[in-house]
Image: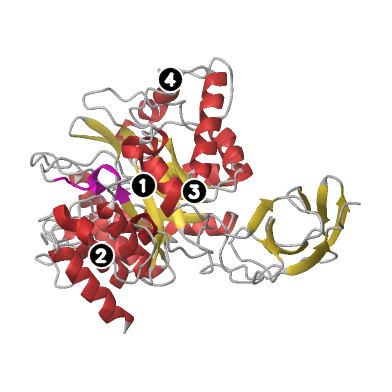
């Protein structure tokens, strides 16, 4: 029944002109104000932003202390805006926004490739600490093959001097050749280094596998194809073999990176953010009703296979197009991904802020999402109506920081007003932590001091404290009653009133997102004499 409703509503959405969108909203979100129409939230929903460092000057223009102050403000603001995950680009072009013995410091951090910060620090370690203190997931975003993002720029990576045969130039940019086993081994070593040394929540890769096609230029991997394709049982004389060979190369990398992560830290997720079209229906009968570049045929990334084989833990397709786009309609693509990604793999929708603005009668974008936001609301509501979609991620995060089109105001005061947790990582573990024991409360003039015993777990745990007043239902299925989340087995509530009764419920959450049953603490505040 729900599937029929979803398709009926999607049909309405695809046929309704966006210019007239303020005249309608999703029928089940009937509420007091138009703003509330997108505010129905579950306890768990991924709310992320991409923070790219490639071609960013903001970091290189600041010294270490200024960067620390800037990042502190940025992470704090994103927390206040309702986000629970940050995808930060730590390896934009075979370089590092972290201390590495394998790769040079990024020019986008210090202005010159290989140049260390004048005042030494580790940006990734610093941001991870900021995120975790704010209970935000940190996803370490790396670009696996790209070794030079600027066209015509000579690669400055030390590895090129040692092994130039591992590199290939295409479109004036440098890449590790995906056809060489040495390239895969090197990228795996990079990932293992990050996972083993940093307390990250995920490794994230975006859409740069084999490079985007450039003006009919041929990618130079003929030698690798002739050498390695026969070992993979591909017939080098079959025209289809080259594409299959390229896909197999990327398949191997993805499969073994996932295995490497699971062996080291099984709670660390591995996620991919592919180009939004897997295959068009003209290329494959099960493809989407779209007409654009395809990640399977053009980038040689068989994302659907990775998801179905359990080689990735989440997929975050970049669905940046508008509702009603002629070649790549947002609604068509969300429904396609929802129907094809298995339950064990989390599906998160990538949304472009700039391409989610309403258009006025003059055809120009509305400049204030606080007063005109139906296009964006409809995108969010479609995601929330589908069983398989676990949340969204916004491109790009600095627009949230800048409050472009008042997007931060819109999210903070409405759509993201009630906080959420990221979806639990139950595909790897669904075992809940032990219940909190020996919980107690001490009332003083400063408020209520709550304490409990630490919970033993195979992973690090944090604690959630929910607060209920007399007469309120003691349910923890949303976070509207969340008093705090803390890593320590204690907290204080100073916001209490004389003569009132309160019930606190304390739970433990592990690194997989599994939450224990609640332990109740009942408190009555004495009346002042």
Residue designated by label 2: 233
Q: Return the mark for residue 82.
A: 3
Residue in the image at 61% along x and 66% along y: 514
Instruction: Give the position of the N terminus as an image quadrant.
Output: bottom left
Confirm whether the magenta stretch covers residue 359: yes
Looking at the image, which residue sits at the far front? 529
Nearest to N terminus: mark 2 or mark 4: 4
- The residue mark sitting in front, 1 or 4, is 1
Marks 3/4: CA–CA distance: 28 Å
Q: CA distance from mark 1 to mark 4?
A: 24 Å
**SS class, disc 2:** loop
Within 10 angstroms of label 2, few (less than 14), some, or many (20 or more) residues?
few
- In this rendering, which labeled residue sits more in front, label 3 or label 2? 3
Task: Please state the extent of the stretch shown in magenta in the rendering.
Answer: 351-360
**Residue position marked by numbered label 1 in the rendering:** 394
Q: Which residue is mark 4?
A: 60
SS at mark 4? Answer: loop
């Amino acid at each position: 029944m729900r599937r029929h409703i979803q398709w009926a509503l999607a049909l309405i959405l695809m046929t309704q002109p966006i210019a007239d969108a303020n005249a309608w909203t999703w029928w089940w979100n009937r509420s007091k104000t138009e703003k509330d129409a997108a505010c129905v939230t579950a306890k768990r929903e991924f709310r992320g932003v991409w923070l790219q460092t490639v071609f960013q000057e903001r970091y290189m223009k600041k010294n270490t202390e200024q960067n620390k102050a800037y990042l502190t403000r940025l992470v704090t603001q994103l927390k206040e805006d309702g986000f629970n995950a940050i995808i930060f680009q730590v390896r934009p072009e075979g370089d590092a926004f972290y201390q590495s013995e394998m790769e040079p410091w990024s020019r986008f951090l210090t202005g010159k490739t290989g140049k260390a910060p004048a005042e030494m620090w580790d940006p990734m370690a610093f941001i991870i600490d900021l995120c975790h203190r704010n209970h935000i997931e940190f996803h370490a975003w790396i670009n696996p093959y790209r070794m030079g993002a600027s066209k015509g720029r000579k690669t400055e990576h030390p590895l090129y001097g040692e092994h130039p045969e591992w590199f290939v130039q295409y479109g004036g940019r440098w890449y590790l050749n995906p056809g060489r086993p040495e390239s895969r081994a090197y990228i795996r070593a990079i990932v293992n280094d990050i996972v083993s040394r940093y307390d990250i929540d995920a490794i994230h890769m975006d859409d740069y596998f084999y490079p985007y096609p450039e003006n009919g230029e041929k990618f130079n991997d003929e030698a690798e194809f002739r050498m390695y394709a026969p070992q993979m049982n591909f017939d080098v004389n079959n025209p289809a073999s080259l594409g299959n060979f390229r896909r197999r190369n990327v398949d191997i990398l993805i499969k073994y990176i996932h295995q490497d992560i699971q062996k080291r830290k099984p709670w660390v997720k591995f996620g991919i953010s592919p180009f939004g079209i897997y295959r068009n229906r003209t290329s494959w009968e099960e493809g989407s009703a779209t007409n654009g570049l395809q990640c399977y045929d053009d980038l040689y990334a068989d994302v659907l296979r990775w998801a179905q084989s359990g080689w990735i833990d989440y997929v975050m397709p970049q669905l940046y197009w508008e509702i009603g786009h002629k070649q790549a309609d947002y609604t068509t693509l969300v429904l396609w991904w929802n129907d094809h990604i298995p339950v064990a793999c989390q599906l998160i929708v990538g949304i472009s802020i700039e391409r989610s603005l309403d258009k006025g009668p003059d055809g120009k974008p509305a400049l204030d999402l606080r007063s005109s936001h139906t296009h964006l609301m409809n995108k969010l509501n479609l995601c929330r109506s589908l069983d398989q979609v676990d949340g969204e991620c916004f491109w790009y995060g600095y627009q949230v920081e800048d409050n472009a089109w008042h997007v931060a105001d819109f999210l903070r005061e409405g759509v993201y007003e009630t906080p959420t947790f990221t979806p639990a990582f139950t595909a790897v573990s669904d075992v809940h932590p032990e219940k909190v024991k020996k919980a107690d409360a001490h009332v003083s003039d400063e408020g209520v001091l709550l304490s409990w015993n630490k919970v033993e777990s195979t992973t690090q745990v944090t604690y959630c404290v929910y607060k209920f007043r007399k007469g309120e239902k003691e349910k923890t299925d949303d976070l509207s009653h969340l008093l705090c989340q803390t890593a320590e087995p204690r907290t204080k509530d100073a916001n209490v009133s004389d003569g009132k009764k309160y019930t606190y419920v304390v739970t433990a959450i592990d690194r997989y997102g599994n939450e224990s049953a609640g332990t109740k603490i009942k408190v009555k505040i004495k009346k002042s004499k």
